[in-house]
Image (spheres, grey):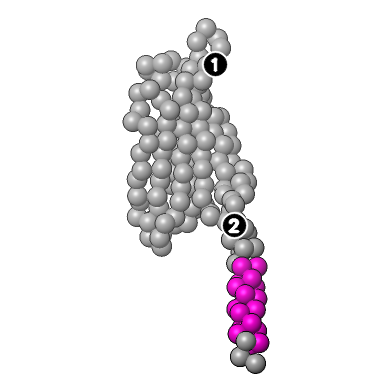
């Protein structure tokens, strides 16, 4: 009788372990990946005293569900009537707390520092910060 109880207890424990594995495995496999949606794009022509005529093209994406915004910028220089890529920048806007925005600026320019991370104190979300602060400053900087 005791032997049958031990076998029944072992089988019950094994069943419970298998059930836990079945429930936890799908949860671990269901990692949510961000989906990107283009929210803005454009091209701005400007004149640089050092390089002459230039243009900057940008595309801005919203990543859901992380609510990050990434701005992909490409800078071109005009040489003998043709546009050539000079460098790229990727700016990431990410809200890390209620009052802090993390701004990561990556550049592959030979003259730049590579990656710069800044933290701005703001209550604005990434959408409002992009449209009311970052984008106007980005376009004004090129004028």
Q: Residue at x 62, y 75 (%)?
A: 14
Q: Position of residue 45 (x, y in %)?
A: 51, 24
Q: Nearest the camera: 41 or 117?
A: 117
Magenta stretch, overall SS:
helix
- Residue 57 visible in the picture: yes
Q: Can you say whether 27 is above or below 120 in the image? A: below
Count the labels in the image. Answer: 2
Dot 2 lies on which element?
A: loop
**Residue 16 vertical position relative to residue 131 in the rendered view, above or below:** below
In this view of the protein, which residue sits in the foreground, 64 or 41? Answer: 64
**Which mark, residue 31?**
2
Question: Farthest top residue?
Answer: 80
* Residue 78 x, y percent position in the rendering: 50, 14
Give x and y (percent) for residue 35: 62, 49
Part of the protein shown in magenta: 4-22
Q: Residue 83: which numbered mark, if any?
A: 1
Tag shown at residue 100: none
Quarter of the picture holding the C terminus: top left
Can you see residue 23?
A: no
Give the CA separation, mark 2 to mark 1.
Answer: 42 Å
On whether residue 10 falls in the magenta region, the answer is: yes
Check disc 1: other Cα within 10 Å, few if <14, some if 14-19, many if 20+: some
Comparing labels 2 and 1, the label whose residue is closer to the camera: 2
Neighbours of disc 2 within 10 Å: few (<14), some (14-19), many (20+): few
| Point 34% across, 55% down: residue | 121
């Amino acid at each position: 009788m005791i032997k049958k109880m031990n076998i029944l207890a072992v089988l019950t424990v094994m069943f419970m372990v298998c059930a836990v594995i079945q429930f936890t495995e799908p949860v671990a496999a269901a990692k949510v990946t961000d989906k990107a949606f283009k929210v803005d794009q454009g091209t701005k022509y400007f004149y640089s005293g050092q390089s002459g005529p230039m243009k900057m093209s940008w595309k801005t994406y919203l990543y859901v569900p992380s609510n990050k915004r990434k701005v992909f910028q490409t800078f071109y220089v005009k040489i003998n009537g043709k546009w050539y890529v000079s460098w790229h920048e990727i700016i990431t806007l990410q809200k890390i707390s209620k009052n802090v925005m993390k701004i990561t600026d990556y550049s592959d320019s030979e003259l730049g520092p590579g990656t710069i991370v800044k933290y701005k104190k703001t209550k604005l979300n990434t959408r409002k910060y992009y449209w009311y602060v970052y984008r106007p400053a980005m376009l004004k900087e090129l004028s």
